[in-house]
Amino acid sequence: MTFEEAVDAVKSEIVFTTHTPIVQGNESHPIERIIYMGANMHLSWEELEELGGSPFNMTVGALRLSKKSNAVAQLHGETSNKMWAEIEDRSEIIAITNAIHKPTWVDPAMIAAAENDGDLWATHLQNKRSMIDFIEAKTGHRLDENNLIIGFSRRAAPYKRSDLIFTDPKIIAPLLETRKVQIVFSGKAHPLDDTGKGIVANLVKMARKYPKAVIFLENYDMAIGRMLTRGSDIWLNNPRRPLEASGTSGMKAAMNGVLNFSILDGWWPEACEHGVNGWQFGDAYENEEDVEKHDAHDLKAMYDVLLKEVIPTYYDNREKWVAMMKASILSTKDQFAVKRMLEEYFELLYKA
């Protein structure tokens, strides 16, 4: 085949999923290095450049060699199409929102209680106690089951701002000292990401400063993720919009009746009914030019919603809290489960 014939033949067989707007997740490599390593698959310098540019961008190459591509949330679809707008001859990018495998992540007793008007709070308390026991076995510290527990477990990438909640000690310190707010963190940084490792170091420092209110669980894995997305009371997510591609941990939490408390990024804009099935903060604010201004805006919004809505509802209006748990489960259990996602991949992408 000629190069052009080979490209056309390959395109008919390939679809591509783009997973992140972050530069590090769309890697580029010098063409001379690709050829030196023998990774050019008999393609010439000119042919590689035609596919992926110079330096060779892996995502650009994939977009040009696929008949159709997809992003992993509706907002991520908009972000991806803006991001790659200048790339000629690329495939169309549609949006297929990620989803989760319910048997792996969701307590069926919580779904049954939501569907059949069972005792959601008692069922949740069982999961909360299991998580507290799990944490005590790992750390020696025992959280108070009667007080609010915030869960946060994900990769310690800088844009996810894992330690944002600690930014203003005047606001957060009294809540931690009285244990009105308890927070459980887990997550790993990439070995070469010094900023991410610094974030983890700060989380560990805060856990040592407030051992009765802040927990950092080492060696983040599926077992920790499962415990936290079942046993926490709320699920905090505060990335810099629009850098979160999807954020499936929030789906796991939502289906377990753990209320999302999140920036409108990734999947959450598709699900959020503020004050009904969870909370948003930040009002979809974006500011790529001024990161400090962006962070200050989102921090103020986070504290406002936490102090004026989340904490009062948890401690003073249990009836509303449980109603929100039920709404969280019923509004997400089908829309963000794998069955819907796989059907969309088949209908919108594989059959293209």
Image: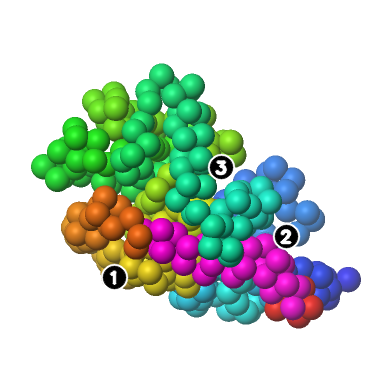
Q: Secondary structure at mark 1?
A: loop
Label placed on residue 283: 1
Which percent across, then down, holds residue 347? 74, 78
Sequence-first disc among 2 and 1: 2
In three-dimensional space, the C-alpha distance between marks 2 and 1, rounded to whole angstroms, equals 49 Å
Query: Residue 79 vs residue 208: left or right?
Result: right
What residue does disc 3 label?
A: 226
Q: Which residues are magenta?
A: 321-347
Q: Residues within 10 Å of mark 3 (few under 14, many from 20)?
A: some
Measured along the vertical axis of the image, is residue 5 above or below residue 217? below
Quarter of the image where the N terminus is located: bottom right
In three-dimensional space, the C-alpha distance between marks 1 and 3, rounded to whole angstroms, equals 29 Å
The reply to whether residue 176 is visible in this rendering is: yes
Sequence-first disc among 3 and 2: 2
Which percent across, then down, holds residue 107? 60, 49
Task: Write the residue at 31% across / 40% down.
Answer: 147
